[in-house]
Image: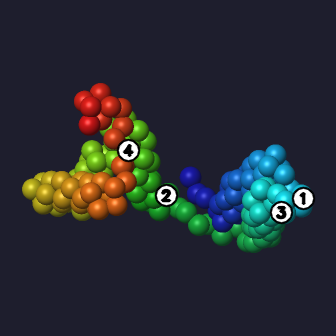
Amino acid sequence: MIISRRSLETATALLTGAFGAAVVVSSSSNGIGWSASGVDAGTFPFIVGLIILSGSVFNLVQGWLQAHDIVLRPSELRRLGILFIPAAVYVGVIPLIGMYLASTGYVFGALAWHKRGSLVFSGVAAISTALALYLIFERTFQISLPRGLLGDIIGF
C-alpha cells in the first residue's frame, strides 16, 4: 500500500475539520456574542473553532492542489506501524491496568524488543520509570495517575 501526500493531507484536514466543527457546534450552546454581563461563554471557543475549521479547509484545498507525491512506501508504513501500534496499546491498557504497570510494560518492551537490549537493563529501566512516575506525580505534585481497574480491584 502506497500513501500519497494528497491522501494524508485530506485525512488530516478532515480530522481537524471535524474537531473544529465540533467546537463550533458545542460552543454555540453556551452562547455566542455579547450579553448584558459581557462576552458570552461560547464566544472564544466559537472563534477558535472557526479558525481551526478554516485552517482545515485551507489545508484540504492545498492538499488537493499539490502533486501526487508518494509520502509513505510500504517499508516506511511498516516502520510507522512498529512505533504506533505499541503506543496505541499502551494508551489502551492504561484504563485497565493503570499508568504504572502500562508504563513499565511499555518501557520494558521498547528497550528489550525494539532496541534489542538486555533483559536486566530493560527491567531496571522499566521499574525505574514507574518509580519515577510515582515519586514525581504522587509524592511531589500530589497528582494521582490512573490506577485502572486492576488498581481498583486490589484496592491500590
Structural crowding at the residue carrying mark 1, measured as other residues with C-alpha within 10 Å and reported as few (<14), some (14–19) or many (≥20): few
The C terminus - image quarter: top left
- Residue of label 1: 36
- Residue of label 4: 146
Question: Which residue is farthest front?
Answer: 37
Amino acid under label 4? Pro
- Residue of label 3: 39
Q: Say whether marks 2 and 3 touch (CB < 8 Å).
A: no
Task: Give the residue displayed 84% in from the left and 59% down from the top.
Answer: 37
Structural crowding at the residue carrying mark 3, measured as other residues with C-alpha within 10 Å and reported as few (<14), some (14–19) or many (≥20): few
Q: Which of labels 3 and 1 is toward the front?
A: 1
- Residue 97 horizontal/vertical position (percent): 32, 38
Q: Which mark sits nearer the N-terminus, 2 or 1?
A: 1
Q: Which mark sits nearer the N-terminus, 4 or 1?
A: 1
Disc 1 on helix, strand or loop?
loop
Disc 2 on helix, strand or loop?
helix
- The picture quadrant where one finds residue 131 is bottom left
- Residue 144 horizontal/vertical position (percent): 36, 49
Question: What number is the disc on residue 77?
Answer: 2
Disc 3 on helix, strand or loop?
strand
Q: Which mark sits nearer the N-terminus, 2 or 4?
A: 2
Question: Which residue is farthest left?
Answer: 120
Structural crowding at the residue carrying mark 4, measured as other residues with C-alpha within 10 Å and reported as few (<14), some (14–19) or many (≥20): some
Question: Which residue is farthest top?
Answer: 153
Amino acid under label 2? Leu
Mark 3 → mark 1, Cα distance in angstroms = 8 Å
Amino acid under label 3? Val
Q: Say whether marks 4 and 3 touch (CB < 8 Å).
A: no
- The picture quadrant where one finds residue 69 is bottom right
